[in-house]
Structure formats: C-alpha cells, structure tokens
Image: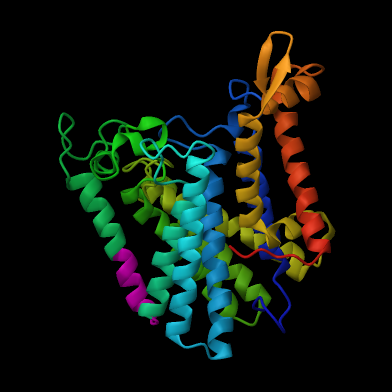
Amino acid sequence: MTEGAGRQRLVSLDTFRGLTIAAMILVNNPGNWARIYAPLRHAAWHGWTPTDWIFPFFLFIMGVALALSHQRRQEAGLVPGVMWRKVLRRAAILFLLGLFLSGYPSFDLETLRTMGVLQRIALCYLLLTGTVLWVPKLRYQWLVMATFLAIYLAVMLGLEVPGYGRGDWSPEGNAGGYLDRLILGPAHLLLGGPYDPEGLVTTLGAVLSAFIGWLFGRVLVRTADQRQIVRRWLAWSIVLTAGGWLLGWIMPINKQLWTPSYVLFTGGLAGLGLAACYWLMEMRRVTAWGRPFAILGRNSLAIFWLSGFLVRNLVALRVGTDGGSVSAWTWLYRNGFANWLPAYPASLAFALANVAFWLGVAWILYRRRIFIKL
C-alpha cells in the first residue's frame, strides 16, 4: 500500500497530486491577467472559488504522502536522528528554492519577498514532520496542532492592531498582516503588503491542512479493507466540509488568512477528491484517464519550480516589435493565441498550453526514469 521500493505506488495519490499541480500551473499562467474566467481567479477576499482549493489540496496530499513515507521508513528501521537530518535538509532546500524564485532575476535584497508558496510548503513540511517525529503518539500530535491553532487564534483575535482594534479580518487590519509588517517588513511582503497570503501567522493555519492529510494517510496505512478506507474518508470529508461551511458563518472562509473555517472546508473537499481518485483507480481500476497526471505527480514540485523559473525568464527576455519591444511571454501570447481567439478564450488557451507543455516535460522525465525529489 505504501509508496517506495518493493511496494506498488499509490497511483491515485500520484494522480491527485498531478491534477493539483496542473491546476496550479493553469491558474498561475494566463495569457492576460485582465482576462481570466471567474473560477480561475482567487476570491477577492472572503469566500472562495475553485482556485482557492488548490494550495490546501497540495498540503493535504503532502500530509497523506508523509503517512506513507513514514510507515516505509519505520519498516526500514531508520532511526529518528537520520530522519531528522533528511527532514531538515528537504525543508531547507524547498525554502531556498522558493527564495530564489522570489528574487530571480534581479535579486534585490531590499525588496526580496521572504515568504511564498514553496517557503510555506517547506515550513508546513518541517512543522508537521517534526511533530510526527517528536511526538509519535497521535493524541499528543493533536495537542501540538491544537497549540498551533490556539496561537493563530490568540494572534488573530487577541492582538490589537493600531487603528483597527482586535479581531479585524480586513486586508489592512488583520493581526497576521500586522505582525508580518513588523517582523518581515512591508517591502518583503507580496506587492509590498499590507499582508502576505503566505505570511508567518497564517502558516500555522496551513499546517492544519497538512495534518488533515496526515490523518487520512493514517487510515490508508492502517486499514486493509479498501471499502472501509473509502467509507471512512467519505464520512470524514462530509463532516469537515459541512463543519467548515457552518463555521464560515462565524469566522469567514478566507484563503489569504487561512482561517480555521477554510482549513475544514478545503480539507473536506480534498478528502472527497482523494476518495474519488482512490475509488476509481485502486478499486475500479479505471486508470487510463489519469495516467498523464500520475506521471506529472511523480515530479510535482520540480515541475512547479521549473514552470515558475521559465515564466521569469520569458518575462525578462525582450523581443523586438514594430512598436518597440515586449517580453517573450507577451510575444508568445499575442502571436500564438490572441491573434486568432477572443480575449478570454485566448488567455485560457495560453494557460492550457502551459499545462500541456509541462505534461510533456513530465512524460520525458518519466520515460528517462528521472524523479527529482524536492
């Protein structure tokens, strides 16, 4: 059941991971940011769109994968010291790769964004894996996560923000953004603030999304009956989704602030997605549809990083035109899509072409048996 040498990989998890990364690439690479269909935009603030599901889905998947890899390492007899070194090394690599993308190509240290998607993944991985290694018993893991939640709520509800008071959930008045401005500095936040969607305090909420995945993964490694696995996942998912929606009436569902209602709501949706993939691919053996995404899922973080790196290079590269020069990114969009499609379909087609390109890269890596573990 677990992934690794001597075991059959969980194709459904690879597929779900690949679908999530494909969705990340799709929403991050429109041809024209002013011409994006509403479901492919983040919610302006409170509320959600399908785009707001993507990041918590990936953290959920990371938690599931951790349960599988932790089981494998325990069976291999790895001592905690060895595992700690691997965890610290991986978290450091992910964080530094994220910092590199934040600064590339100018590397202006005065405005370098400290946090980001890969940085948040690194911190969530470190906090969750560290918890699992430090407190192996589940009841104590719950206690650690409850502590993270308590710190989050204490800051967001209890810290007074000058000019806004306590418990303000606005972009300018939320306490998480206030602390990010104090600790990191406005110049090091996304677009100069007033908050960073991958900020320090809200990362404590994001760890809970990964922990939900860890709990789902524990069911997988401890349950032999596939029907029982799916039944339990479905029950948990329905409760989580409904609980998050109900809590949203008290505390808004907000991706930027990674509120507890958002954690529960998206955790339940991620569970439903995994259960659907597992039922189709592991139980019903309907696998052909997901093969491209399963292949993408084998090099998910590497492909995500490479896609961001390519974008930055294409934006920096200038191409001469009759009216001066434009970025290579804009030139490709205008001459490959916008010159024969209406604005919104052209922007979407360009994003889909990006996904198709990286599916091709993933297929080449897979054929050459190259698996880059970040």
The percent coordinates of residue 282 (x first, y second) are 74, 70
> In the depicted view, which residue is nearer to us: 78 or 141?
78
Residue at the image position 62 percent from the left and 49 percent from the top? 304
> In the depicted view, which residue is nearer to us: 321 or 235?
321
Residue 12 part of the magenta segment: no
Task: Give the main secondary structure, helix, strand or loop, of the magenta stretch.
Answer: helix
Is 34 situated left or right of 337 in this image?
Answer: left
Residue at the image position 64 percent from the left and 78 percent from the top? 2
Outermost residue toward the bottom? 77
Is 180 situated left or right of 69 in this image?
Answer: left
Image position of 360 with respect to 77: above or below: above
Q: Is any part of residue 349 visible from this angle?
A: yes
Image position of 363 with respect to 48: above or below: below
* Quarter of the image with the C terminus in it: bottom right
> In the depicted view, which residue is nearer to us: 93 or 133?
93
The percent coordinates of residue 83 (x first, y second) are 48, 79
Q: Quadrant location of residue 112? A: top left
Residue at the image position 52 percent from the left and 53 percent from the top? 97
The percent coordinates of residue 84 (x first, y second) are 43, 77
Q: Specify the color scheme.
A: rainbow
> In the depicted view, which residue is nearer to us: 61 or 196?
196
Residue at the image position 28 percent from the left and 39 percent from the top? 185
The percent coordinates of residue 79 (x first, y second) are 47, 88
* Quarter of the image with the N terminus in it: bottom right
Highlighted range, magenta: 136-146
